[in-house]
Image (cartoon, coloured by chain):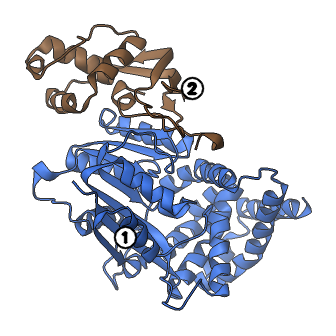
Amino acid sequence: MALLATATVAFKTINTQIRNRSFLPLQKHLSLSSSLSSFSFFRTVSGRAMELERKNSTVIDENGVLKKGIAEFYDESSAIWEDIWGDHMHHGFYPPDSTVSLSDHRAAQIQMIEQALRFASIPLEDERKWPKKIVDVGCGIGGSSRYLTQKFGATAVGITLSPVQVQRANALAAAQGLANKVSFQVADALDQPFPDGQFDLVWSMESGEHMPDKAKFVSELARVAAPGATIIIVTWCHRDLGPDEESLKPWEEKHLKKICDAFYLPAWCSTADYVRLLESLSLQDIKSEDWSPYVAPFWPAVIRSALSWKGLTSLLRSGLKTIKGALAMPLMIEGFKKDLIKFAIITCRKPE
Amino acid sequence: MRLLTHNMLSSNIKGVEKGFPLRIEAEKVVEKPVEMNADFLRKMFEKVEWKAFVEASRSMGYAQLPEEVDSGMLESDEFLSRFHHALLELHLEEGALVCPETGRRFPVNKGIPNMLLHEDEV
């Protein structure tokens, strides 16, 4: 408990300094790299706090703890994300070597959706072949659902573990006049509350990384897909293992674990693992690609936004979970740089 | 939660063979008028499981839907407006959705159904 107290004191001190504006001149001179190294102290402190949280939990079931953590993380963080980045809680898609300003990021996030549809060979020119019923698995505050509903004139339903997100998603839908086309509920992607074969587009945009049982996750996606439906998964994976490798190297496991702790992620798998799972369910037209080069500007941009005046003050008002997540962002950049983390798209079709 | 949504939800508790449709226990139903779109209604008509829809509507306090339907009825303004009202204007704010086989209640609070299963139901 002493370490938790230390962490609280540390954050309270920073908060006071910022309020007194004594931090501000220092902040102006911070380059990105020096500010990253100054985070290392806080990373250690918050890491220990997380360890304590786990040790003190008497819940034996790890998945239950994970789900609760995910729900609480997004309950706490969604508003601050939306405030700075808008209603799409996913990476933007950037042409390689592009230089983008913050205002381009929303366009890039829309591009991500469009490119994913294209990659999955959704026949965009033929209205008769457009999806009519869409499920958004791990829907966040519903950005994808509302976009897809408007694009295709379809109905969509989104599921998430976070009640705060559902409330916000429904409110945004109502505000945009889409409430009769799209609805959201609290549900578990590993046990989707739908009968079999309901949807002709099954959409999972950056939620797969939260699923503790990848096999169950994929089998649920396939179950709720109607015959002929398209399944689109965009997710974070680790690199494929070499033919003689049994597992990732120890430093790689350690690195991923730090990210897992901060973002409430279970163990990672590779793109090849997803492909194998889809194959095992006899799904067709399975395609996958590494889109890491197309998302390179994203994490640096998120970090810059977190270090802005608005970002920092919002973070300090948000909560420990959000702050912990923010502090883990440099780990994502490092992971991509070292070819450990891959931003993957995997799509397929359910047989007719 | 509108009946359009209810018509899509089912209970996936382990061992349950027929988890659809969920029974509605309505504690608070609110009517929120919304503009009617006939094209949308005609599209939705084909997707809606009608028997479950009529029963659900009755649980929400609206019993003016015909038991049996055919697509010819879509020409009737009277039918369309009743269909529209039940499908989109009735909101279950507080209550529960009940698994038809096990009786397990999924709570609905502030219009949001919580379909999360407990660990032993998975």
Residue A330's x, y, as percent?
59, 77
Residue identified by numbered label 2: B105
Residue A254's x, y, as percent?
68, 80
For label 2, the crowd category at 10 Å Cα-Cα, with few meaning under 14, some 14 to 19 and many 20 or more, is some
Residue identified by numbered label 1: A345
Q: Which chain is blue?
A: A
- Taking the spot 69% from the left edge, 52% from the top edge, the residue there is A65
Secondary structure under tag 1 reads: strand
Q: Quadrant of the N terminus of chain B?
A: top left
Amino acid of disc 2: Arg
Residue A73's x, y, as percent?
62, 53
Q: Quadrant of the C terminus of chain B?
A: top right
Can residue A111 be seen here? The reply is no
Chain ID, mark 1: A
Residue sitting nearer the eye, A219 or A136: A219
Amino acid of disc 1: Ile
Residue sitting nearer the eye, A280 or A209: A280
Total labels: the figure holds 2
Q: Which chain is brown?
A: B
Secondary structure under tag 2 reads: strand
Quarter of the image where one finds residue B53? top left
Residue sitting nearer the eye, A7 or A130: A130
Can residue A166 be seen here? The reply is yes
